[in-house]
Image (spheres, coloured by chain):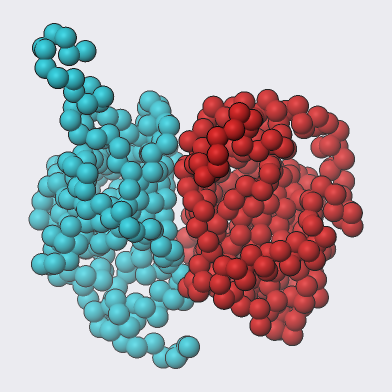
Amino acid sequence: MREVKDVKEVEEKIARVRLRLGGLSVPQLPLLPQPPSFPFLRRRFPDIRLAGACALIGVVLAFAPLHSAQTSMQPETPKPPDASSQLSHDLSGVWMQYPDGPAPGVPGMNAVDERFRPPFTPWGQARFDAAKPMQGPTAVAGQENAPTLHCDPDGPPRVLNLPNPFEIIQIPGRVFMFFELGHVWRTIWTDGRALPKDPDPSWLGYSVGKWEGDTFVVDTIGFNDKLWVDVYGSPRSDQMHLTERYRRLNHDTLELQITMDDPKAYTKVWANPPKLHKLEPAWEIAEWFCVIEEENAYSDTIRKPAGGISTSPK
Amino acid sequence: MSAQTGKPAKTQDADGPLSHDLSGVWMQYPQGDLPGTPGMNTVNERYRPPLTPWGQARLDSARPLVGPKAVPGEENSPTLRCDPDGPPKLLNHPNPFEIVQIPGRMLMFFEEQHIWRTIWADGRPLPKDPDPSYLGYAVGKWEGDTFVVETIGFNDKDWADAYGDPRSEQTHLTERYRRLNHDTLELQVTIDDPKSYTKPWVSPPKLHKLEPGWEIAEWFCAVEEDKAYDDVVRKPAGVAPESNKK
């Protein structure tokens, strides 16, 4: 059991994870096959450094309070707080996944990428076997038991995986994420607090974030085991330590790389390739709640593979 | 600025002496329907105007969990199947909310059901024909020291309070917030819903206390958990569920 006992252990655990990942530097992850459209995106945004430098001017103006709060402990120096900073530290905006999902033209569904899933533990395998997803190879029409079907709340990392936009808002000490799916919002504490020692299991977990160079690193623990990590039924246990790494590659592009360390469900750390998101400056997050009655009708007629008959004619 | 009157300079806020910063976690004072209970009277049933026939029919079909109309075993509150809660009922629950102000927007985070709501404060008008929704479409602006929030575009699926009073899609909700002092937020709610009520429903102002040490916790409505909770605690009949889950 690798339970979180104190902050130091958490930090050591993160260090271990990094070690296992070979000092995770996302763009250079060598073993990751890139989705077909990825090279296209690279061609389209060849000079991320220039764009990042331009964006940096904006972030200094727009987020001076946040930035100075982070550096207030450091002695005054004439140079920028982080001399290596090239990319913007302003992640705010409405973001939508690029259409490089599992199927051509489909966004989402691979920020958590099943192709990179490590072997299950026996517990994880039992959970996975019990899951009856609505899509994928293990889907069985008429037997679907996704938590979504009874409108259970969605949480990370699954909520990051669905093909729907989210908005990021940064205020001093906190980053908010607003997901259109399920109208879910989450808080990432950036006031320097440590992860809690013994958090109550929850749908969203407890998140803290900090900047490591140009990467905003979010660590989350304290999940319950009621939610899946993806739409295919891969489990999430209460021992999961989730790490999200965000980088604003240029003004229009946000990169997200997800790593899951869940020793109860998986025999190894599950590291996913980075997924790109596009800024949608004109979008506003709409109201989309999961409502049981509507959901049942929608599921029966559209979402379930069998595409059955609506149960409650009105 | 103060040259004309010769008085000492006022606070930098030229509009008045009260703060225009509403941010913080707020909790109702314990002056609810029952002594010592908070909430349940921001929308105050004692001030409810007469119902229209449509409104009366809706109220008659409602089976609330609380109040004189509650019938054990027949409850049909939307909350029981975890339907989303919206204003004004959301403001009426005895649970804290947090206000965050950012340029162009005011955000409200409710502990109840983990709901967030956007109030646009960038000068945009109310939309002309919004889609009906649980939260409605809200815009806000300062009138003197009062932050006035106008909301339209509701659906008629949520109640206006815990007693089953209806909320139609014609509801025009007005909330008036004033920060009376550092620790106290006043909220006055007016419901203008001509489809449900024969007159505007004007509730008296309700006070909220700043809770600087609080953080909004995660409280989602999940059907399975909610059913167990309802059966044991919330329904008046209080019957234990048959399945004894751990």
Q: Who's red, chain-wise?
A: A
A197 with respect to B228 (left or right): right
Q: Is residue A191 positioned above or below A295 on the image?
A: above
B195 and A285: which is toward the camera: A285
Q: Is residue B71 positioned above or below B189 on the image?
A: below
Q: Residue at x 64, y 65 (%)?
A: A11
A208 with respect to A260 (left or right): left
Tell me if I can see residue B105 in this picture: yes
Q: Tell me which corner region of the image, top left, top right, bottom left or bottom right, holds residue B67.
A: bottom left
Q: Residue at x 14, y 70 (%)?
A: B68
List x then y, in percent, for residue A114.
78, 64
A93 with respect to A126 (left or right): left
Q: Quadrant of the N terminus of chain A?
A: bottom right
Q: Tell me which corner region of the image, top left, top right, bottom left or bottom right, holds residue A52.
A: top right
Tell me if I can see residue A309 in this picture: no
List x then y, in percent, for residue A311.
54, 68
Chain B's colour is: cyan
Furthest residue to the top?
A: B4
